[in-house]
Image (cartoon, rainbow, N blue to C red):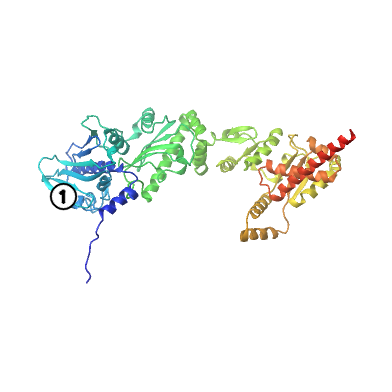
Amino acid sequence: MSDVYHFQVNLGGMLDILSNHLYKSPDVFLRELMQNGIDAITMRRKQDPDWKGGQIAIQVEPGESLMLQDDGAGLTEEGIHRFLAVIGQSSKTELVNGRLPEDYIGRFGIGLLSCFMVSDSIVVHTRPAQGGSAHIWTGHPDGTYTLKPLEDCPVGTTIILTAKPGMERYFKAEKIEELVRYYGLALPVPIYLNGSTKRINSLPSDFSGVSREQLLSFGKWVFHEDFLEAIPIRTPHLSGAAYVLPYRTDQSVKNSHRIYLKQMLLTENGERILPPWAFFLRCFLNTRNLRPTASREDFYEDEALDEARQEFVQVIRAYLARLAQTNPERLRTIVEVHEQAIKAMAVWDEELFRIFIDYLSFETSEGTLTGAVLKEAGEAFWVGSVPRYQQLRSLFLAQGRLLICTGYVSDQELIEQLAKRFQLPIHPLREEDMETVLNEVTSEEKEQAETLLNAADNALQAFDCRTQLCRFLPADLPALYALSDQVQFLRQVQSAQESSTGVFSDALACMLEGIEEKPLASLYLNANNTLIRRLMHMQDEALLRQTIKILYVQSLLAGGHSVQGEELRALNGGLMMLLERISYEEWEQENED
């Protein structure tokens, strides 16, 4: 039969794990001490329901020492050996059928070790509330400890730390007060510093009964911001408030929240508990029944955390719905500042879409219009490319037609939902729809432009593009490029093939060769334009071909399309020919003179 051995714990290695891997900062030593004090007070209240005490007192000798005293349950001699000397053994874990009750903060039995990050010794004075002698326990970072009887000791526990070199900044009253407010602002037990009768931490446990003005004032005190709105949060998992930032922000900016577990600060990072669109909010939240990670710096991913997320979303949605009914001007102000975030919410949340769509704005050929105006606007088209929209905007404006730009984040999804939900005649602009803004020319004009059109087709044959002569407004736009979805896909493949090498490039080349009949794009020449009318009467086909190539590339660029190598060479060739023609004509003119 094999022997049974016990693990040997290297305390120095444990301290390295604590300071360099588990905890982000030595700051947490005070959090752990307050946590132990609160749990000791909770334990004493369970043992004696008639007991009315419960407080934590901190004394600081500047730059030298710190003493934190609670009047909680204290420890017996057996408890000292069991819980202070065994790493990973928490004094709270076996109170109820071997499981940790939900009203205790501590869980892992390693919190006291964090004090070694700021002190080379941990001295504990403790007397149990249920009777028994007092003791003084002294722990050292080499893994040894001493235990002696103690005569003069009140009921409860006192932790005494002495500053080790380089950590003196943590042993100053200002720093301790800052950390108490940071970690323990929401704690239900009063905390006093250096004999003052004024508690450092003071906060309502339920925000649902607090007025808007009080919530905003509290938010300004905590976050140093003048917020636009304060939204009280009260759900089975969460309590607190969500504050609307007074300026625009985006998802890349990580806001600093205050998120507490059992009223002790757990994290400033809201990624685990808040939805992605909440980047325009800063939250002060407390939860009692979510599980922390071992470092107590985030939440454990489980079903309860998912429920808390859903609850948060529902509260925000319900509040905004009430605001739309009771104070639409305030809601409009929020939308004006945080439209990007609200659009991201409204895309996937039908209720938020219903609330916000009338307030959301969209760029159109007739200026910025809200969803409410678009409902009454009649027929409209949308394009998902900003450059393409900019190319067509003046054309639609001149003809009194409405074009919507959906090239911004969330806009296309919202416009499609708007059209579908309210059965509006708003459609994507396709190549075949261009006929709605293009007017035919006369047969006489077609005859006049025969040479131009033949030269244009020859010039653009290599680019799978055909030309058409038509009339459209504005007159100062000489040409307009339009392509179908098929042509757009082929152009993307061609661009990828040009910029690739090796096997991938060969595969793309094979794809292009496998297309038997390539779809054609269209270049519309504007018969209202002065340049086009001059070209209609020109008979120099070589000059016409080069000019058409220049107009073709210019239209590509105006529409926001990628320009390929062959097209750039065509542009350069056309410009060079025009420059040579100009230089030759100037030379002839000089010789005649």
Residue 7 in the image, given as x and y percentages of width and height: 25, 60
Query: Is residue 61 shown left or right of residue 481?
Result: left
Q: Is residue 513 above or below residue 154?
A: below
Could you say which quadrant of the image residue 512 lies in? bottom right
Q: Disc 1 residue type?
A: Thr
Q: Taking the image as drawn, is residue 425 in sight?
A: no
Residue at the location (74% across, 40% down)? 479
- Front position in the image: 406 or 208: 406
Q: Quadrant of the image for the C terminus?
A: top right
- Front position in the image: 124 or 264: 124
Q: Taking the image as drawn, is residue 38 in sight?
A: yes
Residue 418 in the image, given as x and y percentages of width and height: 57, 40
Mark 1 element type: strand
Q: How many marks?
A: 1
Residue at the location (23% across, 45% down)? 120
Could you say which quadrant of the image residue 555 lies in? top right
Residue 423 in the image, given as x and y percentages of width and height: 60, 41
Q: Residue furthest right?
A: 592
Q: Quadrant of the image for the N terminus?
A: bottom left
Q: Residue furthest bottom?
A: 1
Residue bearing the label numbered 1: 146
Residue 290 in the image, given as x and y percentages of width and height: 34, 47
- Front position in the image: 359 or 262: 262
Tell me the crowding category of disc 1: few under 14, some 14 to 19, or many 20 or more residues within 10 angstroms, Cα based: few
